[in-house]
């Protein structure tokens, strides 16, 4: 089903976040290859991202290895469509479920910068540390909707570039 182009844009109902993230990562791999961009992956904090699980289940999940723990993997492909998972600024319409377009990563570890910059188009690379922020735009946004102070700059088409700061970074 995931390889059939007829299903590419179809809504899919899943039983859990692990299945949802696996489908998203598979789609990100295809998108990276089609658009000649690297697929950037990183490990997410298990305590923050698994919620309330007992210790035995947490260790079992961690022992599965990063290629099976889809709910503990962050992924990024420049230009990929995405959906906000939290309310960022309700007054400006940046709410859970809002459609966004991934623009860039703010990476603070020089080793990770080198990893991404040396990646081949379509290559999957793992960061040693999560990015400090994911930069994104909101497609179809009028250039004057956000004050300049609220954005990190503008795309060539005038869309403001916004950021999702990861926990632990300021």
Image (spheres, helix red, strand yellow):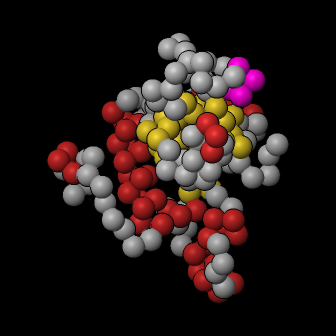
Q: Is residue 20 above or below residue 5?
A: below
Question: x, y percentage for residue 33?
Answer: 36, 36
The foreground one among 30 and 63 is: 30
> Residue drawn at (69%, 84%), measured in percent from left and top?
55
Residue extending furthest front? 91
Residue 35 in the image: above or below residue 90 = above
Residue 82, horizontal then vertical, whole percent: 47, 43
Direction from residue 94 to residue 79 in the image, left or right: left
From what the image shows, is residue 36 above or below residue 12?
above
Q: Position of residue 126 (x, y in %)?
A: 58, 47
Asked where in the image residue 81 lies, by quadrant, the reply is: top left
The magenta region covers 148-152
Residue 130 visible in the current orientation: yes
Mainly helix, strand or loop, the magenta region? Answer: helix
- Pick the residue in front: 103 or 69: 103
**Quarter location, residue 63:** bottom right
In the rendered structure, does residue 150 fall within the stretch colored magenta? yes
Please give the name of the residue rendered at 64% of the width and 58% of the height, measured from the top-left corner: 44
- Number of residue marks: 0
Apparent side of residue 125 relative to residue 22 in the rendered image (left or right): right
Judge from the rendering whether residue 103 lies leftward or rightward of residue 31; answer left or right. Answer: right
The residue located at (21%, 58%) in the rendering is 1
4 part of magenta stretch: no
Question: Which quadrant of the figure contains the C terminus?
Answer: top right
x and y percentages locating residue 69 in the rendered image: 52, 66
């Amino acid at each position: 089903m995931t390889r059939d182009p007829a299903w590419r844009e179809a809504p899919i109902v899943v039983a859990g976040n692990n299945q949802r993230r696996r489908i998203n990562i598979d789609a990100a791999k295809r998108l990276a290859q089609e658009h000649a961009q690297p697929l950037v992956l990183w490990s997410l904090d298990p305590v923050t991202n698994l919620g309330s699980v007992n210790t035995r289940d947490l260790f079992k999940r961690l022992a599965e290895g990063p290629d099976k723990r889809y709910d503990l993997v962050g992924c990024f492909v420049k230009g990929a469509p995405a959906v906000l998972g939290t309310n960022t600024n309700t007054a400006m319409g940046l709410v859970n479920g809002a459609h966004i377009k991934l623009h860039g990563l703010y990476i603070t570890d020089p080793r990770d910068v080198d990893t991404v910059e040396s990646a081949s188009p379509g290559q999957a690379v793992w960061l040693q540390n999560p990015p400090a922020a994911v930069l994104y735009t909101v497609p179809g946004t009028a250039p004057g909707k956000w004050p300049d102070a609220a954005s990190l700059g503008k795309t060539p088409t005038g869309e403001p570039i916004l950021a999702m700061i990861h926990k632990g970074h300021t």
